Image: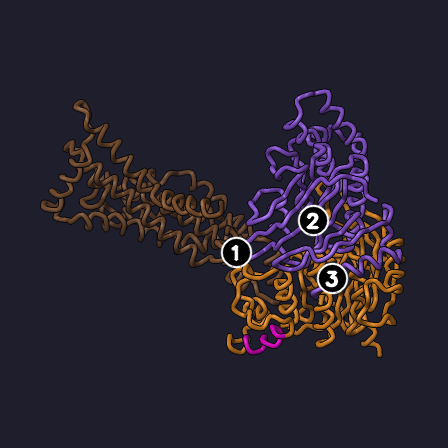
Chain colours: A orange, B brown, C purple
Amino acid sequence: MESRDKKLEIKNICKIFLNKNNGYETAIEDVSFKVKENEFLVLLGPGECGKTVLLNIISGLLKQTSGEIYIDGKLSKGLNSEIGFVFQKLGILPWLTVRDNIAISQKFAGVKKTERYEKCQKYIDLVGLKGFEKYYPHQLSGGMKQRVGIARAYAGNPDILLLDEPFGKLDAQTRYSMQDEILRIWNENKKTVIFVTNNIEEAVFLADRIILFSKQPMSVKENYDLKEMKRPRDYTSEDFLKIRKEISDRTDLVIE
Amino acid sequence: MEVCTKMTKKTKNIIVNLLPFISIGLFIGFWFLVAGKPSSIIPTPYEVYLRVVKLIEKPISHTSIWGHVWASTKRVLFGLLLACFFGIPFGLLVGWNKKFRRVFKPLFELIRPIPALAWIPLLTLWFGIGESSKIALVFVGCLMPVVVNTYSGVSLIPKLNVDVAKIYGASNSQIITDIVLPSSLSAIMAGISTAMGTGWIVVLAAEMISAYQGLGFLIIRGSNVSDLALVIFAMLLIGLIGSVLSSLLRFLERKLCPWKVEIKN
Amino acid sequence: MDKRKIKVQVNNLSKSFGELLVLDNCNFNVKDGEFLCVVGPTGCGKSTFLNVLSNLIEPSSGEVLIDGEKSNPKKQNLSFIFQDPSAFPWLTVQQNVEYGLRSKIKNEKLIKEKTNKVIEIMGLSKYRDSYPGELSTSAEQKIVIGRSFAMQPDLLLMDEPYGQMDINTRFYLEDEVIRIWKEMKTTVIFITHNIEEAVYLAERVLILTNKPAHIKDEVEVNLPHPRDVNSPEFVKLRKYVTDQIKWW
């Protein structure tokens, strides 16, 4: 019971940066929350509020100024093979094929080529890229590149999946299709997911639970439990619009 | 209207493809004009042609034209290869590793401004006046651009690619071979291209000072006996070989970095 | 009854590139001062559509008429706002807004008058001597909007300029566009993939099919600006357009 409730625990995380004027800038003030196992958690906040910083801290790429992160009850000290990451700017290596990109975690682990390719085929199929194994990134559309990023994260067989505004650069319609995709993939292959976005509609469509953050210095503003909302959700249903408006009114307006 | 535009497009294409030949033709014509004047010291293209025929019958230094071409080219290629062999890993380490950079970069920055030709006395004393000193000179000349371009390339690697490697479990050495090297590949190719240009300059200078074979040697030989036709012929050969090698290098870059070319398209 | 006269006429417009038919017999009119949005599915050929409308490329058949004459960017006053637009960083706000005007009008007084009007509407009076780099992203976008509207073009074409932006900034800028459009009464064709944006802005929405693209349907949006995305009328229109395009 304990472990199901607390797959991941973020405790009093604070991050302060030295900014260009040699002053101190508090990106994250004091953030604490828990994540349940196999929950689809969405971190929502206005643009540039610090959500990416928080995600980088959780993944181990960045060190926090203070606070702790616990995974399965154990203190996390940095990079962790339990965590997969889908980056906002993709980070798909242009000199590798789709297959090699997806199999990269296996390559670094020293798994032989044929074995790697075998293991990763199911992830290529999972994201609907069957037949594109030998293509190079520049031959793919935006949506397809995103899928490579997602398959790559899945191929490492992580327990926790972090996604940093993965659909931000896509046009509105491709975005809708990818939202359907990610839910389908997640349903077929349940993981604990933390999904960062600044798009309220996207958050309400995807989340089991939404944590709404303030603008910088970032802190938790509100928690929305959407577990009861039936899936698949309808962007234009009354319930949906009601929640969307509620969250929209509560969001800090930041016009950059 | 459609048919008309199609036809002019076809003729346009033909003209565009003929342009390089037209410009070379014009150049040769201009050359004839200038050289044809009685007061001119420049040999006409025909005179150069005659000189080439004579050269084939009576080779200089018992070496055929190809022999001279290969003598110079060989020196450049060996020097360049050595420069890459040592320069690329060195550049990668300097670019990537802070400690290494702190130790070696200042030293390198001190040596860098010294032109390769200034090394001639030192290298001649060390290696003598044979092949090895010339190759050593080319090595020095090529080393600088290769190293500089390599470590600049490393500094321009998107941090994102490194983050990806870290997240997916790469060790430090894996990061260098699998991320740093491919990411800097096109900068390295640019360095090699520049180095090749420098290599040629250096080899010709070295040959003009002391050699019995090579294109630079032919130039100095011709100059010593006022055989301008020979000089011009050697210059033309240098231009030709230089552009062939550059094309080969570009071809190599296209093969090694196919993704870069696509992005340009 | 819309009493405005017809500004733009598109008759039997088709465009193919070799074997590929991209636009297939498009027919529509745009009234003077109308705000028209065009939506289509991803990959429907909207860039080609825009390029042919502005005569940057020749249509394969058919014609585009502005005020009864063939569309010609050299003769007529056409203005564009493309994706990810930016102001000229080396010019001040004032100079940026004047920029387009200078190529069409010689009268200094008139230029200053028109520029000042636009700067005021956009709320940029305080910043008129600042450089775009000193201002926020949304302020820079307002400069771009102001610059295009200041020219009082015969036709303003906008190609999904806010696609990459933060949702809040996006709605804010869309409101700004509507505000200046109402003041300047410019004829606008705004092309986007975002259906909610199209319904939010347009007086009328044209729906394109996938390649070969033709006009599938036309929807009037009779709601007052600024629109409420939660209102049942808005939702109904949005659903209707979505159903026509939905491929996902």
What amino acid type is highlighted by mark number 3?
Gln
Chain under callout 2? C
Counting other residues with Cα less than 10 Å from the Cα at mark 1, is it few (<14), some (14-19), or many (20 or more)?
many
What percent of the width, then of the height, locates residue B15? 36, 42
User: Image check: B18 left or right of C187?
Assistant: left
In the image, A165 versus B135, the foreground residue is A165
Asked if residue B207 is among those painted magenta in the image, a careful observer would answer no
Q: Secondary structure at mark 2?
A: strand
What amino acid type is highlighted by mark number 1?
Ser
What amino acid type is highlighted by mark number 2?
Phe
Asked if residue C135 shows in the view, the reply is: no
In the image, A8 versus B117, the foreground residue is A8
Q: Residue at x 69, y 44 (%)?
A: C158
Counting other residues with Cα less than 10 Å from the Cα at mark 3, is it few (<14), some (14-19), or many (20 or more)?
some
Q: Residue at x 72, y 33 (%)?
A: C152
Q: CA distance from mark 2 to mark 3?
A: 18 Å
Report the quarter where the N terminus of chain C lies: top right
User: Image check: A78 left or right of B50?
Assistant: right
The residues colored magenta run A117-125
Q: Residue at x 78, y 36 (%)?
A: C185
Q: CA distance from mark 1 to mark 2?
A: 50 Å
Q: Could you say which disc has been placed on residue C28 in the image?
A: 2
What percent of the width, then of the height, locates residue B217? 21, 41
Mark closer to the observer (1, 2) = 2
